[in-house]
Image (tube, grey):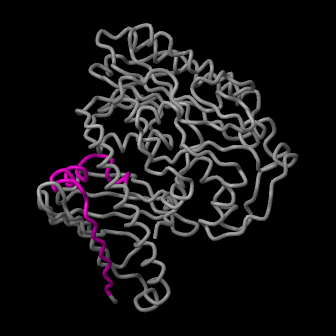
Amino acid sequence: MPRREFVRRTRVEAPTEEVFAWHKRPGALERLLPPWSGARVVRRTGGIESGARVEVELPVGPRKIRWVVEHRDYVENRQFRDVQVSGPFAEWIHTHRFEPDGPSACWIEDRVEYSLPLGGLGDFFGERYVRHALERTFAYRHRVLACDLETHRTYGLEPRHVAVSGSSGLVGAAASAFLATGGHRLTRLVRGVRSGTGVAFWDPETGAVDTEALAGVDTVLHLAGEPIVGRWTASKKDRILRSRVQGTRALSEALATMPRKPDVLVSASAIGFYGDRADEWLTEESPPGSGFLAEVCRQWEAATEKAEAAGIRVVHLRIGVVLSAAGGALAAMLPAFRWGAGGVLGTGLQFLSWISLDDLLGVVLHAVARRDLVGPVNAVAPEPVTNREFTRVLGRVLGRPTLLPLPTFAARLAFGEAADELLLASARVRPARLLETGFSYRDPDLETALRSTLGRLT
């Protein structure tokens, strides 16, 4: 069977030891898995030392397969190798090499030797696809690595003990991996698990929080809440409201009673706070709007009152539409756009205030590090776009036509009340506090953000 080779080298502005340490920490592989791939880590034994194994679930066509690799040939600060034990390839050997380039930079090299199944037949039909996939994957991986290292270096935070709620969601999972690779220790707030390493029990419904398991926590990242997608039945709306308000209140009250309180609570909110405001520019100083989501956000933010009264610095991240191919709004609309069936929603004139998932992670770190940030912070990119512009750019990035609109009446018929507040509402939000405090965006414009998360950088 033919053996092929792929190599990608990139110079990184960080010492070899720092880059190697990043790869050793929990969350490194999760940060490197391309969001468009649908891959997820399901099991691991050990770190990256020789003999450790990782099992990844990987979508291949209509089914999912398990890909098991074993780490071998580990040399501290110089290399480690991943060898396929079972999976989609006939053979897979991935060597990670780290070469110093002076005291403050290094070269990273990913060398992949692989053979496709079915011998010459697999090579004939699959080689072009695999080569393209490797180019996309490693362009993404090297960008994420370099940018994550730069972000952590920019803030220079000493290792912190961070409690995270909602850690299984799109943002929570990414934030957990991002913080862990930055050297921070995590404790996950989970329901249904009374004890365990790195977890603390809580129940937003009853208000129970295991504060003993949170002893020593200096930062809390609160992201839990019922997903807002789907038709808004009376029971769905009740879950949306209660999960945010009761959960936030319970957590805030528990933190306020701790003998040693956290320094900061970064609590999620949303730009739904502003309601439907047409083309009006909105900042953190703007009053709340009207509608269900605006009322949810108002009560959500007010639920941190006990934590604030106890002297904990509270930051409310009013999060815009988070763009990631791994989940959320973008992932939901991708199938239609890829089939050429995407189009403008309603009039297309409504403003969409968005942020890339990677920039949102940077905002979290910014909120923790900047002690002058208190209260609402608009977590959005600096340039909101209309739905019409968003549709045009996404179609261009995907190379697909966008000729099939979804009229207002059809959106309301399909999604009910949720259509007016999620799809047709307009919020032109400016991240005034982030800009004032010097936040640097990784993906400041829409096309860069989409190309990154969709693997269209090359």
Query: In which quarter of the view is residue 77 placed?
Result: bottom left
Q: Position of residue 2 (x, y in %)?
A: 34, 89
Q: Quadrant of residue 303?
A: top right
Above or below: residue 92 compared with residue 74: below
Q: Does residue 402 appear in the picture of this structure?
A: yes
Q: Is residue 303 above or below residue 339?
A: above
In the rendered view, does 376 fall on the left or right side of 211? right
Is residue 88 or residue 254 the one in the foreground?
254
Asked if the stretch drawn in magenta spans residue 234, the answer is no
- Residue 130, percent across and down? 44, 77
Q: Residue 372 at what x, y percent from top left?
A: 39, 23
- The residue lying at 75 percent from left, 26 percent from top is 291
Residue at the right extreme?
409
Residue lying furthest front in this view?
Answer: 436
For the point 40% across and 72% down, which residue is it?
134
Q: Quadrant of the N terminus?
A: bottom left
The range drawn in magenta is 3-31
Up/down of 205 relative to 176, above or below: above
In depth, the one of 86 and 237 nearer the eye is 237
- Residue at 30 percent across and 68 percent down: it is 85
In this rendering, would 245 be left or right of 47? Answer: right
Residue in the picture at 40% in, 58% down: 33
